[in-house]
Image (cartoon, rainbow, N blue to C red):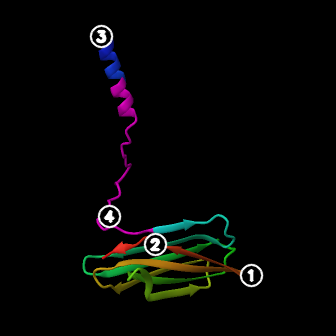
Amino acid sequence: MKRNRLVMIGLSVFLLTQTAIPVCAAECPTIPTETSSYTSAIVPRMKYTARVATNLIIDSKGKATVTASVDGYKNITSKVSLSAELQRYKNGKWSNVTTFSDSDNSHRIRLYETYRVSKGYKYRVVVTSTAVHNGKSETQTITSSGKKY
């Protein structure tokens, strides 16, 4: 009887130590109420591009918020550009709804755009980025996951 009790206490302690408990020193971050389809690519093999990311959020009224960013390497990348295509899935294929683009003579760029979408479709963002160093460029394309509205 005493042995069973010790085994049960031991197992309880073991299980409690295996449970992850979130701890915050100051203020815990809030969990977002909207779902998003965030996609990020970290590409160590690229010479001038450190990171390319995109995010698509569609609110309950059909306002799609497209964010995209390109981070090159400071003091290496001299120019970055990106093109973000908002696409809709219809009749078994993806088609372009609108395109947002920007460029800068810097090592990083951020894009934030909104667009009203139609209900009943799935949407995604395809980002094509270019980073330049001494006249040489490299291009990368990433695609967000689909978001139904």
In the rendered view, tell whether residue 129 sits above or below residue 16: below
Tell me whether circle 2 and circle 1 mark residues in contact (CB < 8 Å): no
| Residue kind at label 2, given as amino acid type | Ser
Q: Position of residue 83 (x, y in %)?
A: 53, 84
Q: Which is in the foreground here, disc 2 or disc 1?
A: 2
Please give the name of the residue rendered at 33% of the width and 67% of the height, measured from the top-left corner: 35
Residue located beneath label 3 in the image: 2
Q: Main secondary structure of the magenta part?
A: loop
Disc marking residue 85: none
| Residue kind at label 1, given as amino acid type | Asn
Tell me whether circle 3 and circle 1 mark residues in contact (CB < 8 Å): no
Tell me whether circle 2 and circle 4 mark residues in contact (CB < 8 Å): no
In the rendered view, tell whether residue 112 sits above or below residue 21: below
Say which label, 2 or 1, has the lower sequence index. Answer: 1
Which quadrant of the rendered structure holds the C terminus?
bottom left
Say which label, 1 or 4, has the lower sequence index. Answer: 4
Q: Does 109 appear in magenta?
A: no
Residue located beneath label 4 in the image: 32
Magenta stretch, residue numbers: 11-38
Task: Kindly state the secondary structure of the residue where label 3 is placed.
Answer: helix
The residue nearer to you, when weighing 145 against 56, is 145
Task: Kindly state the secondary structure of the residue where label 2 is placed.
Answer: loop
Please give the name of the residue rendered at 40% of the width and 75% of the height, measured from the top-left corner: 56
Task: Kindly state the secondary structure of the residue where label 4 is placed.
Answer: loop
Q: CA distance from mark 3 to mark 2?
A: 58 Å
Q: Residue furthest front?
A: 92
| Residue kind at label 4, given as amino acid type | Pro
Residue located beneath label 1 in the image: 134
Q: CA distance from mark 4 to mark 3?
A: 48 Å
